[in-house]
């Protein structure tokens, strides 16, 4: 597939530029989240920052979603008991990775 800038992406917050999403090494600016309302502007851009955080989470969310779908696609294939156990562990790990990506995207635990 490809065709996109690989992650990780981060939200750049120095100099008051909330909403700039760039690669972790700072080499590529991926996006600039725009302010969405006058209320947002007066409140110090919380919605703009939330939008940027969601955009920055895109590579992690994509990777986690791909991992979950691959694990669940494997469920219908005939396997050994050991393979079933390993697949169960991978499904659980994939779901935990997806939970972590969702938490990062939504800012839970901040």
Image (spheres, rainbow, N blue to C red):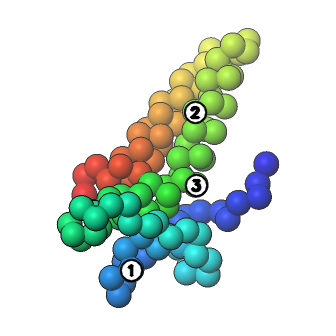
Dot 3 corresponds to which residue?
59
Q: Which mark's residue is nearer the viewer, 3 or 1?
A: 1
In the rendered image, residue 61, in percent from the top left (x then y), is placed at 53, 47
Q: Residue at x 37, y 74 (%)?
A: 18
Q: Quadrant of residue 88?
A: top right
* Picture disc at residue 68: 2
Mark 3 packing: few (<14 Cα in 10 Å), some, or many (20+)?
A: some
Dot 1 corresponds to which residue?
17
Local SS, label 3: helix
Q: Which mark's residue is nearer the viewer, 3 or 2?
A: 3
Q: Marks 1 and 2, Cα distance to the nearest angstrom?
A: 34 Å
Q: Quadrant of residue 27?
A: bottom right
Q: Marks 3 and 1, Cα distance to the nearest angstrom?
A: 22 Å
In the picture as drawn, the residue positioned furthest to the bottom comes out as 15
Of residues 82 and 62, which is closer to you in this image?
Answer: 62
First in sequence, mark 3 or 2: give its number.
3
């Amino acid at each position: 597939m490809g065709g996109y800038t690989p992650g990780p992406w981060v939200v750049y917050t120095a100099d008051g530029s909330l909403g700039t999403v760039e690669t972790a090494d700072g080499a590529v600016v991926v996006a600039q989240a725009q302010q969405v309302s006058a209320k947002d502007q007066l409140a110090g851009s919380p919605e703009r920052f939330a939008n940027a955080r969601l955009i920055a989470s895109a590579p992690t969310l994509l990777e986690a979603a791909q991992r979950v779908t691959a694990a669940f696609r494997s469920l219908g294939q005939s396997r050994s008991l050991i393979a079933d156990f390993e697949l169960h562990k991978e499904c659980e790990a994939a779901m935990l990775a997806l939970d972590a990506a969702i938490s990062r995207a939504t800012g839970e635990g901040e």
